[in-house]
Image (cartoon, grey):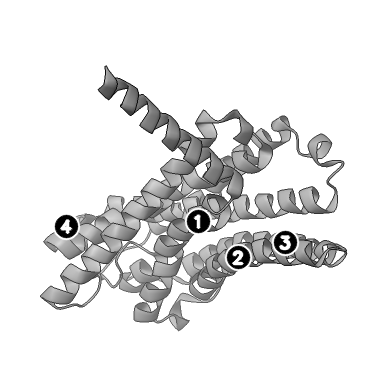
């Protein structure tokens, strides 16, 4: 059990000088704002325009909503560390942050797998798409992803409450990642390490296999397109999507699908930035904002706002 005389951890963050710390703070603050604005813009556009009330945009809206919470589970605390040197976090708060981080990450893996299957059905079976991917099916797929995402890591998280921790209580990370937290434990972490790695491997590798199979089938279908221009356009879209998928899964596999003892704290922090910060920033632009239909909706919304403002000023 956790020692009663110690209720707080210290998040080490990054070792930086004052000027470098200010620069890094500005970079992450801007990235955080970009992610929030980009994802909120997607949710707003889909909400306002009925033309975007389709299965694909329903999945993208769910992903955008998820990314807002995912990046918010780590970056605000990182900004506090950089701006105010606020490194203290309570032990329950630390474990709770870990739970939300891994749970939201799990939901993202499930959603990416679901979205890859959706695109596979749309490209490989276009005539049957609307009979297979109905509104009811979409709702159930998203609901299952969220529910199972929050359920999956309850047991590994409960195991962490059974660990005891020794001084100096410094977590060598910018958030409470499992590999960094257990390294300051006095307990035997073999059981926790084995359970957490097993759950993480099942989630990450299982969803990755489904995503990979879907994209391979998509690529084979694209090769059958007679038009060269059509092939190039389809490959361009799928390649950008698979680049983001590779970034998400690559960083997660590197950090979680291996024993804690073999991990490098400093390297883990850098790789974690790709997963926890860059992915929520890139997702809106790769999956949605570069879509012409969405861009058209934004132009129309902008023109309406300008028109309304002009009419108010003329009054």
Q: Where residue 135 sits: x, y (%)?
A: 70, 31
Q: Residue 240 carries which label?
A: 2
Q: Name the residue beneath numbered marker 3.
A: 234
In which quarter of the view is residue 133 placed? Answer: top right
What is the spatial separation of the Cα atoms under label 3 and label 2, in whole angstroms?
10 Å
Q: Quadrant of the C terminus?
A: top left
The answer to which image quadrant residue 290 occupies is bottom right
Q: Which residue lies furthest to the top in this view?
A: 315
User: Which of label 4 and label 2 is nearer to you?
Assistant: 2
- Residues at discs 4 and 2 in contact (Cβ within 8 Å): no
**Which SS class for mark 2?**
helix
Q: Quadrant of residue 120?
A: bottom right
Q: Residue at x 61, y 38 (%)?
A: 58
| Sequence-first disc among 3 and 1 | 3
Q: Mark 1 points at which residue?
A: 285
Which badge, 3 or 2, comes first in the chain's sequence? Answer: 3
Of the numbered discs 4 and 3, the one sitting upstream in the chain is: 4
Q: Are marks 2 and 1 in contact (CB under 8 Å)?
A: no
29, 73: nearer the viewer: 29
Q: Nearer the viewer, mark 4 or mark 3?
A: 3
Any part of residue 87 in sight: no
Q: Is residue 134 left or right of residue 47?
A: right
Label 1 Cα neighbours within 10 Å, binned few <14 / some 14-19 / many ≥20: some
Q: How far apart are marks 3 and 1 (CA)?
A: 17 Å
Q: How crowded is mark 2: few (under 14 residues within 10 Å), some or many (20 or more)?
A: few
Give the alpha-carbon distance from disc 2 to disc 1, as whole Å. 10 Å
Q: Visible in this render: residue 183?
A: yes
């Amino acid at each position: 059990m956790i020692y009663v005389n110690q209720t707080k951890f210290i998040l080490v963050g990054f070792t930086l000088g004052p000027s470098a710390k200010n620069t890094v703070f500005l970079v992450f603050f801007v990235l955080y704002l970009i992610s929030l604005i980009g994802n909120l813009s997607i949710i707003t556009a889909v909400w306002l325009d009925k033309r975007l009330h389709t299965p694909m945009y329903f999945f993208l809206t769910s992903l955008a909503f998820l990314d807002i919470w995912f990046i918010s589970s780590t970056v605000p605390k990182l900004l506090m560390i950089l701006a105010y040197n606020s490194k203290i976090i309570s032990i329950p708060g630390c474990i709770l942050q870990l739970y939300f981080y891994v749970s939201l990450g799990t939901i993202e893996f499930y959603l990416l797998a679901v979205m890859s299957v959706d695109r596979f059905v749309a490209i490989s079976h276009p005539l049957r798409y609307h009979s297979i991917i109905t509104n009811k099916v979409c709702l159930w797929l998203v609901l299952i992803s969220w529910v199972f995402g929050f359920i999956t890591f309850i047991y590994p998280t409960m195991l962490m409450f059974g660990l005891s921790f020794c001084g100096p209580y410094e977590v060598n990370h910018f958030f409470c990642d499992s590999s960094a937290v257990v390294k300051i434990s006095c307990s035997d972490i073999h059981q926790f390490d084995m359970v957490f790695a097993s759950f993480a491997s099942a989630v990450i590798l299982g969803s990755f296999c489904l995503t990979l199979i879907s994209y391979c089938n998509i690529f084979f279908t694209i090769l059958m397109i007679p038009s060269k221009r059509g092939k190039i356009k389809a490959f361009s879209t799928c390649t950008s999507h698979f680049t983001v998928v590779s970034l998400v899964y690559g960083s997660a596999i590197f950090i979680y699908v291996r024993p804690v003892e073999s991990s490098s704290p400093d390297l883990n922090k850098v790789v974690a930035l790709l997963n926890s910060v860059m992915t929520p920033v890139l997702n809106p632009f790769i999956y949605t904002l570069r879509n012409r239909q969405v861009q058209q909706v934004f132009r129309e919304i902008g023109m309406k706002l300008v028109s309304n403002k002009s009419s108010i000023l003329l009054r």
